[in-house]
Image (cartoon, rainbow, N blue to C red):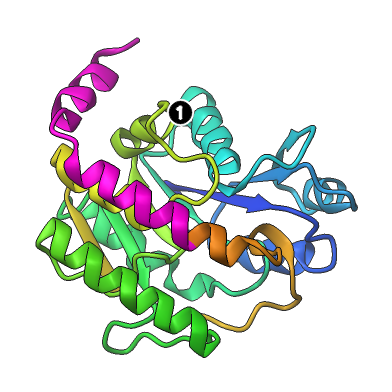
Amino acid sequence: MIEDVLIIVPAFNEAMVIEDTLGELKKFVSRVVVVDDGSQDDTGAKAKRSGAIVLRHCANVGYGAALKTGFTFALRYCQEPFFITFDADGQHDPEFLQLLADTLRKDCADYVIGSRFLKRGSSRSPVARKIGSKIFSIATSALIRQRITDPTSGMVGLTRAVAKIFTSNLFPLDFPDADVLIMLSRMGFRIAEVPVEMRPAKRPGGMHSGVLKPAYYLAKMSVSMVHFALRTDLKKKRREIEDAV
């Protein structure tokens, strides 16, 4: 049982699968926080019955906003030194939680990405998604001068220091991905990747669904990456956030 890690699960309309996901997680960790992002089904009720701490948004406000709510709660009310984000739809395999936790414990990184594309890792993602991830991988690696193979992974581990940054107004409220890596690198945080395997989602939809979202994501992420890459005040912003009460 992993006692020093809190799992944060953003969820939207995942009533069909949330109990299975939480059942798997409970075999590995003692505490899970589910952020119900305005679901129109029984996601929150089923998560609560499964033993999770449930936070609920009154409306669907986005993946990043759900994470921010989870981090804000965790920093205020939970003592675990590390957090790991985990998708509600069954894609992530909890067998790899220990690997992310071990990397954080060794103090060799502040932010650990579970990569589908490192050696030994694997993914059954659609071809279009793999191509998009590859493009952002090349761009991110060039901008932070560090090889990043999976900048869009939703399975990541982080320290409380990084979580505090994510509760600030710098954190994107819709799609925090490659742009966040650039921000953290510019702030001086250490980023690492570990290989993980991911499974097909147990159902379509959820936090990442929508007809227009792929086009919006591509445009928004490109602009946001350039924005953070050009900023010269991020180390100062980090100090201000860390010094704030």
Expressed as whole percent of the image width and height from the top left, the position of residue 139 reads 24, 66
For residue 9, side relative to residue 39 (left or right) = left
User: Is residue 195 something that shows in the picture?
Assistant: no
Quadrant position of the C terminus in the picture = top left
The region drawn magenta spans 218-245
Question: Total number of numbered labels?
Answer: 1
Q: In this orientation, which residue lies closer to the viewer: 169 or 5? A: 169
Residue occupying image coordinates x 55% and y 57%:
216
Q: Is residue 201 above or below residue 229?
A: below
Q: In this orientation, which residue lies closer to the viewer: 191 or 186? A: 186
Residue occupying image coordinates x 36% and y 39%:
81
* Magenta: main secondary structure: helix
Single out the residue that lies furthest toward the top: 245
User: Is residue 140 something that shows in the picture?
Assistant: yes
Residue 91 falls in image quadrant: bottom right
Residue occupying image coordinates x 34% and y 32%:
165
Q: In this view, does 227 lie above or below 218?
A: above
Residue occupying image coordinates x 16% and y 58%:
143
Single out the residue that lies furthest toward the right: 41
For residue 14, side relative to residue 107 (left or right) = right
Residue under pointer 1: 75
Residue type beneath disc 1: Leu
Expressed as whole percent of the image width and height from the top left, the position of residue 63 reads 59, 49
Q: Magenta stretch containing residue 244, yes or no?
A: yes
Q: Magenta stretch containing residue 149, yes or no?
A: no
Expressed as whole percent of the image width and height from the top left, the position of residue 8 reads 55, 48
> How many residues crowd around disc 1 within 10 Å: few (fewer than 14), some, or many (20 or more)?
some
For residue 60, side relative to residue 239 (left or right) = right
Tag 1's secondary structure? helix
Residue 69 falls in image quadrant: top right
